[in-house]
Amino acid sequence: MTPPGTHAGSNDDDVQLAALGYSGEFERSMGLWANMALGFTYLSPLVGVYSLFAYSLSIGGPPSIWWIVIVGVGQLLVSLVFGEVVSQYPLAGGIYPWTRRLWNRRYAWLVSWIYIWAVIVTITAVAEFGGGFVAALFNLEATPGVVLGTAVALLVVAFAVNYSGTRTLARIAQLGLAAELVGVIALGLFLLLFRREQSFSVFFDSLGAGGGDGYLGVFLAASLSGLFLFYGFEACGDVAEEVADPARQIPRAMILTILVGGVSGFLSYAGYVLAAPDLQAIVAGEDVDPIPSILESSLGTAGSKVFLVVIVTAFLSCVLSLQAAGSRLLYAFARDRMLPASAWLAHVSSRRAVPTNALLVVCVVPVLIALFVYFQEGVLARVTAFAVLGIYVSFQAVVLAALRQRLKGWRPAGVWNLGNAGLVVNVLALAYGVFAIVLLLKPAPGTETFLDRWIVAIGLAVVAGTGLLYLVIARPDRHSADIPEGDAREVAQQLQQMRRGSGVAAREEIR
């Protein structure tokens, strides 16, 4: 281990990896900014703001923007907990190895089962939504067939980039980061400064949203404007074995993802609100897709076309990052022999140093789901309803497991940690997470049927129930009984001893 304050090289990274029971199969070619770009393009504030702008305004009016601040602070707390965990366990797959080493293999199996399906469905949804923008870019009518074809094209192109190796993934992620920043910050500032149609006081005016009901319930219902935006930063940790000095750089990348994503998302949302020529129509639900008209009136036809290129690049980068994260989770799962066909799924190309078969799965399964959506019109919202809730539940499973270990005496021993503030941050992160999950389970306003009211909870129950049933019947966890689990305190002591030994050796060498 490298003493604090020094830069770890690949040998030090491999020493920590070996101490955790694994040998390196990947190429450590990803630095801080490339790692942050991967998380940022997964988080994708452009995609999140564009997708929920009209919906959140129609529910809560302009004050909905403050959910970006509220959720951003909450998820920053979660990222701090993740930072401590990944600094001690810089392992590929993120959620799976973290929950295994903080609790046990059965807990990790169920949490990861929920998370991988949430990611796969999210990949499908992003590709489907992106397909409509690809169609608009080429002046095609967004028929179901065209959307299917463009969505599949996005999935295949993203797979090809991922398949080519970590270096290419890093380059395209950084290109996607640039596109996102242009699309959200530059355009947001342009709209704020030069195309403002509304006063800033509008962010404290509901404009009649919610009718005559009390505004608190309406404001809580509009929380999706923030909750749908702030996840993806965990992808920084999914590729931990491909990052140089991951114990130090990944926590920083996660925090940067939240901060930059939050600021850019806030500026973008504010810019669209202030530039909207008929904001009241959006709040009233009369204009369900207002951003194209805002762009058209603000940028002109040519300018809006240029921005469509930026949007398509952002969607492609988002799919790319989702595939990368999902494939590393599958690889980590399979490396520990926790899945059927584990040997096949855990294969890493010696030439490209990527888990090629796991990548194939997270491309092919979303294609199959896209085909299902094509033949079952209107089902996309239902099959994706549980995705965000599944991701938040998986996040809080890590936070809960970390708190459990802390209460048993664990003091995180990664080179990046919160020290004495760790327990307080952990408790606050869990409290926030429970609050967020309750908001996600809350039925949307105006839903009447039982299925529509509780579709999010039903989706999660189906996925979690099938996973639990398979775990009880097939016992996939029995195949990896020899691999460490629940060893947070023991590993922390081991790393501290290694660090002390490294410090003694360094002082002797100086003498």
Image (spheres, helix red, strand yellow):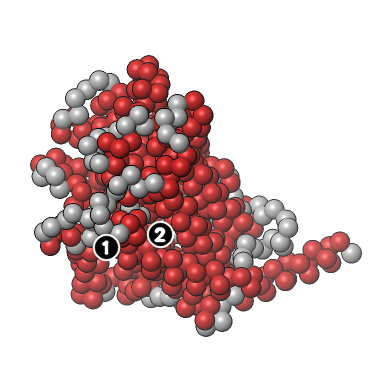
Question: Disc 1 residue type?
Answer: Lys
- The numbered mark at residue 82 is none
Q: Residue at x 35, y 29 (%)?
A: 277
List x then y, in percent, for residue 34.
53, 42
Q: Secondary structure at mark 1?
A: loop
Residue highlighted by disc 1: 442
How far apart are the two marked residues, 2 and 1, measured between alpha carbons? 33 Å
Q: Secondary structure at mark 2?
A: helix
Q: Is residue 249 left or right of residue 206?
A: right
- The numbered mark at residue 332 is 2
Question: Which is in the foreground here, disc 2 or disc 1?
Answer: 1
Q: Is residue 196 visible?
A: yes
**In this view of the protein, which residue sits in the foreground, 43 or 221?**
221
List x then y, in percent, for residue 187.
46, 30
Q: Residue at x 20, y 48 (%)?
A: 381
Q: Is residue 127 left or right of residue 80?
A: left
User: How busy is the neighbourhood of tag 2: few (under 14 within 10 Å), some, or many (20 plus)?
Assistant: many
**In this view of the protein, which residue sits in the foreground, 475 or 452?**
452
CB within 8 Å, label 2 to label 1:
no
Name of the residue lying farthest toward the front? 212
List x then y, in percent, for residue 407.
52, 81
Quarter placement of the N terminus: bottom right
Quarter placement of the C terminus: bottom right
Question: Disc 2 residue type?
Answer: Ala
Q: Is residue 222 above or below residue 458?
A: above
Give the quarter of the image for residue 368: top left
List x then y, in percent, for residue 71.
44, 56
Q: Residue at x 22, y 22 (%)?
A: 140
